[in-house]
Image (cartoon, rainbow, N blue to C red):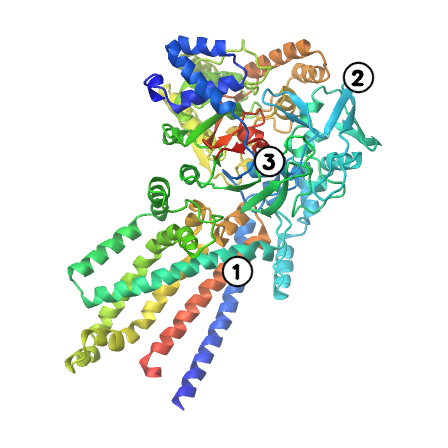
Amino acid sequence: MGQSLTSLFIVIQVLKRLGIAFLTLIVVSFAVFFATDMLPGDVAQILLGQAATPEAVAGLREAMGLNEPALQRFFGWLTGLTHGDLGTSYANNMAVAELIDGRLKNSLKLAGVTTAVSVPLSLTLGIAAAMWRNSPFDRAVSIATISVISVPEFMVATLSVLIFAVWLDWLPALSFGADVSSFVDVLRAYAMPVITLSCVICAQMIRMTRAAVIETINTPYVEMALLKGASRWRMVLVHALPNALGPIANAIALSLSYLVGGVIIVETIFNYPGVAKLMVDAVATRDLPLIQSTAMIFCISYLSLITLADVIATLSNPRLR
Amino acid sequence: MTSNKPTNWTGHDDSMVENMLRRGASRRDLLKFLMVSGVGAATSGSILFKAQQALAATPVTGGSLRAAGWSSSTADTLDPAKASLSTDYVRCCAFYNRLTFLDESGTPQLELAESIDTADAQTWEVKLRSGVEFHNGKTLTADDVVYSLKRHLDKSVGSKANSIAKQMTEISKLDDLTVKIVLMAPNADLPTILSLHHFMIIAEGTKEFTTANGTGAFVCDTFEPGVRSIGVRNENYFKSQKAYLDSFEFFAIPDNSARINALLSGDIQLAAALNPRSRRLLEGQDEVRMSITTSGNYTNLNIRLDMEPGTHFDFVEGMKSLVHREAIQKSVLRGMAEIGNDQPISPSNRYYNINLEPRAYDPEKALFHFKKAGLVGTEIPMITSSAPNSAVDMATVVQQAGSEIGMKLKLEQVPADGYWSNYWLKSPIHFGNINPRPTPDILFSLLYSSDAPWNESRYKSEKFDKMMLEARGELREDRRATMYWEMQEMIANEAGTIIPAFISNIDGVSSKLGGLKSNPLGGMMGYAFAEYVWLND
């Protein structure tokens, strides 16, 4: 009985979330559209660059079908989207889906590897810091996380390239297109971008984990567990951690959502073709279908991570267990 | 080897000597130059030896090259008519051919054309090579050439070369291998015009540019806009000397230090257009060298003559004396430039007027003119941006010089995004950046004739327009040169464009890379390096 009630609750919760997510997507796409529309110049002017004489711009606009009102083109794109058609890029006439395909995979690969490295690392460090609160170990972790998050990532990236690729010659300076025939090559190619990204996202996760675990350790029922003779490890992992999962999941979701759209600096320095650079290109060329499609991807990945975090929080809620 | 060099000798000096050699300086000229600079005879010999070695080595076949430019985006294209960034030019040169191309001295040489003849510089007959094949096996005919050239006249193509192509009033096929081109007015430069990157020859009827079907030395293997391009050697190339490289990969690393790091770590063998500030990073490294070319790229300060305050010609005169060219050349551009004299033809061009001295930095003279214009103390906005190369630093130098004599030049830095469509050509005082163009006529008709599309200062002179047309149809070299010299003087003295320096292009090159020469169409051998370079083991 309780079991089915719980699952029903979760299904309703997820459905409600999906509805809100759908509305959010529509609102975001309108916001992106109006923001793009406010940018000076259109794709014909940008493509012609210095050669944009009024006649040349008019001719190209005509040929590209840009003379229709912008709002009408936007609705055209939105209608296409309902059939799963992301439209055609203005800048190079290729299907947006084709442009996004390879680069989204690249971004997801990088995000996946970074997640696999940074989440276990942050959880371990965060929990350990909470267990040995105020010990030299805890202090060291705190100082390290704060210093790492204070250094801008382009600096971490550039310095690590200088040290590991140029001076020591251990790792390739570019991550993409390097010769990746074996597992070791893959590790070598991903090492530096993953380290750089982990530096950025680990700090927040470690601090949040530590705070959440400490908070539950201080609750009476955990103290009770300790008094009943549970070991320190058992107390933290079995009694405290499940109740701290909600805030931790949220912190992780927020950090990870950064990995899809926010990694522009890492993509630039390591010459890694992901979706963040794609969106910057799209904005620079005022390529509306591409801007909209990438914005939707960022929005969807953000919303799904947040929804997932909420579901985990709900599941970890003792009143529902 | 270092013991054979003077103590303060740097990699920059090496590349300078190399650059002189490329331009055709004889061994004797160079020894004289080195002696004057206080370098002993024995040492000079060894310096020369190193520079000559870099230029003349035996080509090696095989290997694959990875090269990085500085910009690439989803707007990357394989359509030669729309080519606009270095990455586009590199691809076009590798996958297609032109009717003519420019050699390192700026002289047009025949490529797909077998001969180009004219009697009056107005009606031209282009004979094509026979037996040239496109990558898909189609044989090159006059139809392809007519199609390729006519596209530039079609507004819906969005060709960047439309304004230059407009003068071709008739482009027609005479027989399978002969094309007739009739110009609106005589233009003796047609062979050079046809060497521009936009006039690459594509197969008749080509509308899709997801891959390249050209006649070039490389076949397009991969083209991912904004990511990378890979070309593999065309074994069916029509030239007897096919490409040395098995394949090449070209992509962009927009960040300057990332590009240098990739070169230093050996991940790439060619890093294009490095910032002059990074010179020190490359000097003293054995595995890399710099390839420096000054081919006519410049950033200029434009004062519109039809708007306040440029309507007071004394203001323009004052500004010309206020611009400290040496400071811009030495500190802003780190010595990687040649001082300019307010006209667009670079010292490497054979029509350069050597008698036209650059204006001296003279604040007192400037103040005299500003007083005459009644503008001392008036706040005058000067638009700058990071879009034109080094314009922000240049603007700061000018503003400082102004504030020392009481001129209130107000720096307004605007975003690079949209700069060319919103501020360039439009604001009363702004910066521009002009890429190298091969002939004085193209520069003049693009930038200085009364109806020029990019007339940056709105310079209008009937005499200039008349001379331009006359020189254009003039087949006698010496007559043309005389006219071009006078026109350079007119621009320097009458127009509102201040050209303080011609900016050198620095390509970082791995010492394994051989065969890279300079070219008047720009860095990376006028973007055509792929066909000519080789990799030593």
Residue A159 position, x and y percent, is 33, 43
Q: Callout 2, which amino acid?
A: Ala
Q: Which residue is mark 2?
A: B119
User: B269 or B225, which is in the foreground?
Assistant: B269
Q: What's the chain of the residue with tag 2?
A: B
Q: Which residue is mark 1?
A: A296
Indicate the quadrant where residue B171 lies. top right
| First reached walking from the N terminus: tag 3 or tag 2 | 3
Q: What's the chain of the residue with tag 3?
A: B
Q: Residues within 10 Å of mark 1 (few under 14, many from 20)?
A: some
C-alpha separation, residue under disc 3 versus residue under disc 2: 32 Å
Q: Which mark is residue B89?
A: 3
In the displayed image of the protein, which residue is found farthest to the right? Answer: B175
Q: Callout 3, which amino acid?
A: Tyr
Residue B235 position, x and y percent, is 66, 39
- Do marks 2 and 1 share a chain? no
Q: Callout 1, which amino acid?
A: Met
